[in-house]
Image (spheres, rainbow, N blue to C red):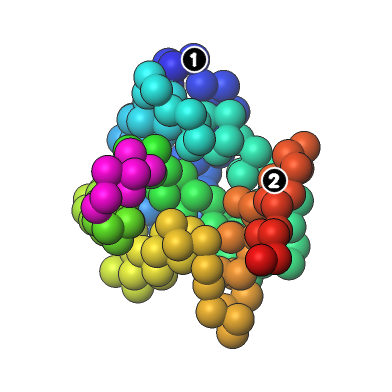
């Protein structure tokens, strides 16, 4: 379905990449956007699909004035789901969730580096992806706090249920 991703969505990825300092040509950034959209659209993606990515990015847009660097948040959101649906399958299979998190981070790190993003920015995105996959972030890191809240409080979706007391 990546080929069916809205053009504005792919263009927003390219724009965010340019804002964070990617030096790759626009056509390479667009190819990366298409690849990520394909991953988010892969058959069998129940939780982390393209529809979910659009909702998360919309939420980031809504809170962008409160974030220090919303483009970093946008790119972290794009990459965190590259393998995450498969991560759920891995987790259900009894493996550590860190495996899937590391896979997302490694993929993002390698691709962002190849696309000319500075090491400092890549390291920050790696960190944000780690927080996203755990749905937890340090209280002292405002942008990291914004991300998990955005994933849990996506507009139009019911908030997560609190556990029942025992």
Determine whether, in the image, residue 18 is placed left or right of residue 95. Answer: right
> Is mark 1 in CB contact (under 8 Å) with mark 2?
no
Q: At x 39% / y 38%, what residue is drawn?
A: 85
Q: Residue furthest bottom?
A: 140
Mark 1 or mark 2: name the one nearer the start of the chain: 1
> What is the x, y in percent for residue 123?
34, 69
Q: At x 58% / y 29%, what residue is drawn?
A: 51
| Magenta residues, start to end | 88-95
Q: In which quarter of the image is residue 45?
A: top left
- The residue tagged with tag 1: helix, strand or loop? helix
Task: State the CA–CA distance, disc 1 to disc 2.
Answer: 22 Å
Determine whether, in the image, residue 94 is placed left or right of residue 63. Answer: left
**Which quadrant: the N terminus?**
top left
Q: Name the residue under label 1.
A: 4
**Which quadrant: the C terminus?**
bottom right
Q: Which residue lies furthest to the front in this view?
A: 166
The reply to whether residue 110 is visible in this rendering is yes
> What is the x, y in percent for residue 36?
38, 34
Q: In which quarter of the image is residue 125?
A: bottom left
**The magenta stretch spans residue 92:** yes
Magenta stretch: dominant SS? helix
Q: Name the residue under label 2.
A: 154
65 or 96, which is in the foreground?
96
Q: At x 62% / y 44%, what residue is drawn?
A: 56
Give residue 43's mark: none
Q: At x 38% / y 19%, what residue is drawn?
A: 43
The reply to whether residue 121 is visible in this rendering is no
> What is the x, y in percent for residue 34?
39, 27
- The residue tagged with tag 2: helix, strand or loop? loop
44 or 124, which is in the foreground?
44
């Amino acid at each position: 379905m990546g080929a069916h991703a809205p053009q504005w969505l792919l263009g927003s990825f390219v724009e965010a990449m340019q804002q964070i300092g990617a030096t790759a040509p626009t056509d390479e950034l667009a190819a990366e956007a298409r690849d990520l959209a394909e991953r988010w659209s892969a058959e069998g993606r129940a939780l982390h699909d393209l529809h979910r990515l659009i909702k998360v990015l919309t939420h980031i847009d809504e809170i962008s004035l409160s974030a220090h660097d919303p483009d970093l948040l946008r790119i972290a959101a794009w990459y965190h789901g590259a393998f995450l649906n498969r991560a759920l399958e891995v987790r259900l299979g009894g493996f550590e969730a860190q495996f899937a998190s590391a896979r997302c981070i490694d993929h993002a790190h390698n691709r962002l580096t190849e696309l000319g993003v500075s090491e400092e920015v890549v390291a920050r995105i790696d960190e944000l992806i780690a927080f996203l996959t755990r749905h937890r972030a340090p209280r002292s890191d405002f942008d990291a706090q914004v991300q998990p809240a955005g994933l849990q409080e996506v507009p139009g979706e019911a908030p997560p249920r609190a556990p029942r007391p025992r």
